[in-house]
Image (cartoon, helix red, strand yellow):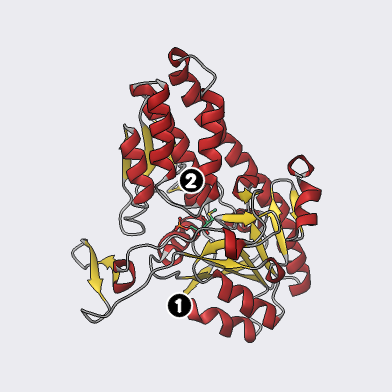
Amino acid sequence: MKIDGRPWRPIWLEADGGRVGIIDQTLLPHRFETRSLATLDGAAHAIAAMQVRGAPLIGATAAYGVALAMAEDAGDGVLDRAVAVLAATRPTAVNLRWALDRMDRHLRPLAPGERREAAYAEAARLVEADVAANAAIGRHGLELVRAAARRRGPGWPVRILTHCNAGWLATCDWGTALAPIYMAHDAGIPLHVWVDETRPRNQGAALTAWELLAHGVPHTVVADNAGGHLMQRGLVDLCIVGADRVTAAGDVANKIGTYLKALAARDSGVPFHVAVPSSTIDWTIEDGIAGIPIEERSADEVRHIQGMAEDGRVLSVRLVPDGSPAANPAFDVTPARLVDGLITERGRCAATAAGLRGLFPDHS
Ligand code: MRU
C-alpha cells in the first residue's frame, strides 16, 4: 500500500540481500521509522516486542528470522535453535508455527551449504503467497460489501466495524479484514469504518486509523465499549475482523474484545465476518476455547497508555493506581456459532467444519 504516494510493505529484503527491513509499529502513528533486522535474535525481538505484529506478518518475520540464522550458520543445530527461539515469541497466532514448519520442511533435507539461499527464497515465496491470499480475500470480501451497499441504497455509505488492526501492517500487504474495505473504497463504493480503539495496545486507534487515513477511507475511532451501542442503534451494516487462529470447526481467536463485538452483533442482527488466509487455520484443533493458547501479556500494558507529548516525545503514562493489580489476556475466542462467515483466499464459507472442508478438501 502507499504512504505519501510511495509503495510500502511492512517487511522487505534490504538491497544488500541479507538484512530484512521492517516498519517499527510500536511508534505509529506518531513516528514512521524503519528497522533493519540482521540476526535471528533481532527477528525474535521484533516479534516479541511487537515492532511487527498481526498473525500473517508474525509468520513472515519468523520465516526471514530462519533465513537470517541460516546466513550465519546453516547447520542442523542452528536450524533447531532458530525454530525453537522464534516459536517461543508469541503463542496465539498459528501463522508462526505454520511458517516455521514450512521453513523447516523445506530446509531440513538440504545440505547446509544450500540452506542460506534456499531459506531466503522460501521466505520470499511465503511473503508473495500471503500478498496474493490477501488480495483474493479482498476480492471475495468485496462481494459482501457490494451486497451491503445494495441493501443501503445508492449514495448511502456502508458502515463497517472492525477491531484491532487486520490491515496491510498486520500482513505482507493488503491486510485481511481491511482488504475488502480497500477494494470497495477503490471501486467507488461509499464506506464509513468504525475503528475500535482496541485497548490496551490501541492497534485500532494507532494503526488501523493511520492506515485508513493514509488511503483516504472515511472512518471514526470509537472507544472499545461503543460498538454494542452503535449496533443497537442500527449504525453498523457489517462487522469484519481478522484472526490469529481459526480452528477446524470455525472457532476464532482474535484480539481481546472481539468476542464481545460478536455477541453484540448477533443480538442486533449485524452480520459478523472473519477474514483469514488459510495459514491462520489450525487444522489440528476443533474447540477453540479449550485448545487455543491465549497470550497473557504484561500488566503494564493495562496500567499505562502510550501517546505523544506536545514536544514530539512518545510517552507512556500511568492510568491505574499504583498498587492495583491488572491482568492482560491479549486474545479471546469467538465461538463459531457467533460467526456468520469466513472470508478466505478460496472464497467464503460457513464457520463450520463442513464449510471449511468444502473450501479446503486437501485438509480433510
Ligand atoms: O497482538 P496483535 O497486534 O499481533 O494482534 C493482531 C490481531 O489480533 C489481528 O486481528 C490478527 O492478527 C489478524 S491480522 C491480519
| Residue 50 in the image, given as x and y percentages of width and height | 37, 52
* Badge 2 element: helix
> Which is nearer the eye, 171 or 216?
171
| Residue 48 in the image, given as x and y percentages of width and height | 36, 50
Query: Residue at (61%, 53%) from the top-left corner?
Result: 179
Quadrant of residue 105 in the image? top right
Do the CB atoms of the residues marked 2 and 1 lie less than 8 Å apart?
no
The residue tagged 1 is 223
| Residue 131 in the image, given as x and y percentages of width and height | 58, 41
Quadrant of residue 274 in the image? bottom right
- Image quadrant in which the C terminus is located: top right
Question: From the viewer's perspective, is 278 left or right of 45?
Answer: right
Question: From the viewer's perspective, is 65 left or right of 151?
Answer: left
Q: What amino acid is at disc 1?
A: Ala
Question: From the viewer's perspective, is 83 left or right of 27?
Answer: right
The residue tagged 2 is 57
Does the numbered disc 1 mark a residue whose Cβ is under 8 Å from ligand 1? no
Q: What amino acid is at disc 2?
A: Leu
